[in-house]
C-alpha cells in the first residue's frame, strides 16, 4: 500500500508545482517597473495546506523557479527557489508544528511567510542590484507579497470550510 501512497504524493506534488508555475507565469498584474503580482504565491500557500509543509517545499521551489525561467528572469531562479521553499517551510512550521493544522495557524504561518518572502527577496535584490536595486524594488515586493498572502489565506479559509476542500485535503493524506 505504501507504493500507491508514494505515487499519489508524487503526482499531487507535481500538480501543485504545475499550478504554482501556471499561476505565477500567466496571471500577472504589473506593479511599477520592478515587478508584478501573481497568483503563484497563493498556490504555494494552498500547496502547504493540501500537501503538508514538508511535501510542499519542492513544488514551491520548482514551480516558481520554472516560472522565472519561462518569463526570462533566469537570474532569479535560485533566489526564487530558495525564498519560495522557505515560505512553504515557514507556513509548515507555524501552522503544523505550532498550531497543529488549525486554520488560525495557517493564517499566522502565511503572515510569517510574508515576512520571510520580503526579507529573502530584499536580500536577493541587494545582492543582485545593490542598494539602488533594492530601493526601487521594495514597494512592488511588499505589494506582491501582500496580494499573494491575502489571496492564499482567503483560498485556505474557503477550502477549509467546504466539503470539496476537505476532500481535496484528505486525498493528499
Image (tube, grey):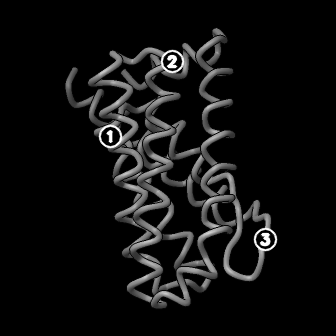
Along the line of sight, the residue nearer the viewer: 133 or 50: 133
Residue 133 is situated, as x and y percent measured from the top left of the image, at 55, 87
Determine the residue positioned at 50% across, 63% down: 64
Quadrant location of the N terminus in the rendered image? top left
The residue to which callout 1 is attached is 55
Determine the residue positioned at 66% across, 39% down: 150
Q: Disc 1 and disc 2: Cα gap in Å?
A: 19 Å
Q: Disc 1 and disc 3: Cα gap in Å?
A: 30 Å
* Mark whose residue sits in front, 1 or 3: 3
Q: Is residue 80 left or right of residue 31?
A: left
The residue to which callout 2 is attached is 103
Determine the residue positioned at 55% across, 14% down: 167
The earlier-in-sequence mark between 2 and 3 is 3
Which element carries disc 1, helix, strand or loop? helix
Quadrant location of the C terminus in the rendered image? top left
Relative to 171, does residue 140 appear above or below in the rendering?
below
The residue to which callout 3 is attached is 30
Dot 3 alpha-carbon crowd within 10 angstroms: few under 14, some 14 to 19, many 20 or more? few
- Residue reaching furthest left? 2
Residue 21 is situated, as x and y percent measured from the top left of the image, at 57, 60
Along the line of sight, the residue nearer the viewer: 50 or 114: 114
Relative to 76, does residue 8 appear above or below in the rendering?
above
Dot 1 alpha-carbon crowd within 10 angstroms: few under 14, some 14 to 19, many 20 or more? some
Amino acid at each position: 500500500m505504501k507504493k500507491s501512497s508514494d505515487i499519489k504524493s508524487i503526482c499531487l506534488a507535481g500538480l501543485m508545482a504545475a499550478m504554482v508555475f501556471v499561476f505565477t507565469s500567466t496571471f500577472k498584474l504589473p506593479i511599477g517597473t520592478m515587478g508584478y503580482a501573481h497568483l503563484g504565491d497563493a498556490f504555494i500557500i494552498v500547496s502547504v495546506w493540501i500537501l503538508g509543509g514538508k511535501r510542499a517545499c519542492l513544488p514551491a521551489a520548482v514551480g516558481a523557479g520554472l516560472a522565472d525561467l519561462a518569463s526570462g528572469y533566469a537570474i532569479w531562479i535560485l533566489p526564487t527557489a530558495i525564498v519560495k521553499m522557505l515560505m512553504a517551510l515557514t507556513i509548515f512550521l507555524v501552522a503544523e508544528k505550532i498550531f497543529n493544522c488549525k486554520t488560525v495557524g495557517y493564517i499566522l504561518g502565511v503572515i510569517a511567510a510574508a515576512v520571510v518572502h520580503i526579507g529573502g527577496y530584499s536580500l536577493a535584490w541587494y545582492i543582485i542590484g545593490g542598494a539602488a536595486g533594492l530601493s526601487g524594488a521594495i514597494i512592488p515586493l511588499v505589494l506582491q507579497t501582500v496580494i499573494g498572502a491575502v489571496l492564499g489565506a482567503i483560498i485556505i479559509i474557503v477550502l477549509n470550510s467546504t466539503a470539496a476542500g476537505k476532500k481535496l485535503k484528505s486525498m493528499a493524506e
